[in-house]
Amino acid sequence: MEVSLEIIGQKLKERQNILILTHQNPDGDTLGSGMALYYALKQMGKRACVLCSDPFPQKFGYLFTKYQQEEIHPDLVVSVDVADTKLLGKVSGCYADQIEICIDHHISNRIEAPMRYIDAKAAATCEIIYQLIQVLGETITKEIANCLYTGIITDTGCFKFSNTTPRTHQITAALMELQCDFESINRKLFDTKTRGQIEVERTVLDSMEFYQENRIALVVVPQKLVQETKIDSADLDGIASIPRQIEGVEVGITLKERPEGGYKASVRTCLYADASAICGKLGGGGHVRAAGCAINRPLEEAKQLILDAAVQALAQ
Ligand SMILES: [Mn+2]
């Protein structure tokens, strides 16, 4: 059921051991949301834990400087930035049936929880968490500000994507007032690449394919390349934005081979095609400009399936 942030705040105050679930292949928004909520709950004297099925990526290490991993027996389970229980992955997935509070900004959210707060106008779940912490009456410390800034800056692509609103900037301004480390975070997340990232980009660029009179660009990231370069899976996210940098390309598709087989498709669109509709056809979802889906097929079939969906979206 859809509820207000006041009701969610009340529930958080009532319970003592709170488990926060983030999505697999964690990004800045799910981790920023989870950690910001964690720090606020610790201030309230709660026991809390942030769970992710994948290891926390190194580049987001600064979010966890004051995190203390503790075993808890949760009496409340909250999911943040998770659009579907399928996206929880193996570890967090064990708690899928126990989610009482679901906080998210994906319009495609499919989680059935007794308390849902879905704001598709929020550029990042971190925008919602910012409001929630205010409802809780908790201080937004520098640590919390850094977490919230991280989610906002990654989900808006440095305020470049169409999801950016005046509210996004108002919240960010407030975080800057609170001395968030915006300069070093920006440098770490956007102006620094590992050697492995550059190696992957070099190979991937060589294999780029074009379709539909160059309106669709597609790249494939084989698992072998990921292993050879020892690249962190979070560092692969940047690859998805490369195809749509090309003039005239409306749909950029990245097919990442998964260790367990099959492919993870990341779709980015420029001006008019709906990325979430493309991925929705294959059981995935996301946002208008950025979406994803899993395709459990060999490469040529996976390619054909996602290309067919993209061609349909271009025709609309
Ligand atoms: Mn998000």
Image (tube, helix red, strand yellow):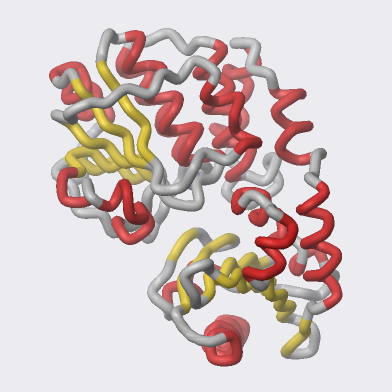
Q: Whole-percent x and y of residue 138?
A: 37, 10
Residue closest to the eye, 107 or 96: 96
Quadrant of the frame with the C terminus: bottom right
Which residue is drawn at the image coordinates 38% and 57% (left, top)? 87
Please identify the quarter of the rendering in which residue 248 is found.
bottom right
Q: Is residue 152 above or below residue 286?
A: above
Residue 107 appears anywhere in the view: yes
Which residue is drawn at the image coordinates 25% and 14% (left, top)? 46
Q: Whole-percent x and y of residue 128?
A: 41, 33
Q: Is residue 41 above or below residue 296?
A: above
Residue 316 appears anywhere in the view: no
Residue closest to the eye, 29 or 115: 29
Q: Is residue 105 above or below residue 268?
A: above
Looking at the image, residue 49 sits to the left or right of residue 176; the answer is left
Which residue is drawn at the image coordinates 49% and 15% (left, top)? 66
Q: Whole-percent x and y of residue 63?
A: 55, 25
Q: Whole-percent x and y of residue 113?
A: 18, 47
Please identify the quarter of the rendering in which residue 275 is found.
bottom right
